[in-house]
Image: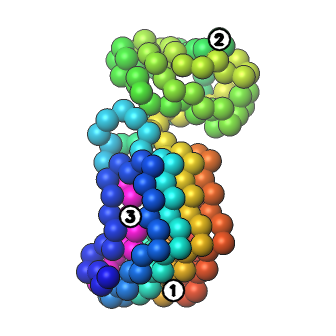
Amino acid sequence: FPSHDRGISLLQANECQIINNIILGNTGVTLTGIFLYYDGTGATHANSDNLIAGNTIRNIKEEGIILDTYNSTGFKYGGTATSGTNNTLADSGATWANNAYVGYYCVIVDGTGKGEYRYITGNTGTVLTVQNYFNTTPDATSKYVILAPQFRNKIIGNILDNVLREGILLWGNSIGAAIANNSLTACGGAGVS
């Protein structure tokens, strides 16, 4: 179908299948072919477990396919732990409101426990409590972020042609994504940030 602003645009899409669409844009006008975004409302993960496959997207001014949590309030806080237990992470420098981060995720991005992420079930002013035990107890080397991530999205077998910016862009807080067998011609490439 012809598009003037965005071909397909979904807010907080979870478990959607966007398959075998043809989006023929106008390079000077059409911003995005497929746009899944999170607006920061609700304390849950957004844009998760989606399949975007077999689509043809041509003549796009900005991104061909974008999954976006970055421009919203998906990122909440980042810091370095001062200690932890098997199901808590403490940051003595934090000044959080009680239970402000229930429903978000704690992701350890560096140091002890790097790569682990857990669902937050409660917090005090300085301690996060998580749903499942950490495999490795966080310590003073554990750098972490609190965010609403996008999980396990699959972008497979799409054809993107004449896309002026990124052909495929996962913008902010993406965990476990698969980008495979896509054809990008005259595009800015693919990116995860």
**CB under 8 Å between discs 3 and 1:** no
Q: Residue 107 sits in which quadrant?
A: top right
What residue is disc 2 on? 85
Amino acid at pointer 3: Phe
**CB under 8 Å between discs 3 and 2:** no
Amino acid at pointer 2: Thr
37 in magenta: yes
Seen in the picture, residue 67 relative to 158 is either above or below; the reply is above
Determine the residue positioned at 51% across, 26% down: 119
The disc label shown at residue 35, or none? 3
Residue 85 at x, y percent in the picture: 65, 11
Say which quadrant the C terminus sits in.
bottom right
What residue is disc 1 on? 161
Please state the extent of the stretch shown in magenta in the rendering.
29-38
Q: Nearer the viewer, mark 3 or mark 2?
A: 3
**Which SS does the magenta portion mostly show?**
strand
What SS does tag 1 mark? strand
Determine the residue positioned at 66% across, 72% down: 181
Task: Measure the alpha-carbon separation of dots 3 and 2.
Answer: 39 Å
Seen in the picture, residue 169 relative to 146 is either above or below; the reply is below
Residue 12 at x, y percent in the picture: 35, 48
Q: Mark 1 or mark 2, which is nearer the start of the sequence?
A: 2
Q: Mark 2 or mark 3, which is nearer the start of the sequence?
A: 3
Seen in the picture, residue 150 relative to 147 is either above or below; the reply is below
In the drawing, does residue 181 fall left or right of residue 120? right
Residue 28 at x, y percent in the picture: 32, 87
Amino acid at pointer 1: Asp
Q: Is residue 23 visible?
A: yes
Seen in the picture, residue 180 relative to 69 is either above or below; the reply is below
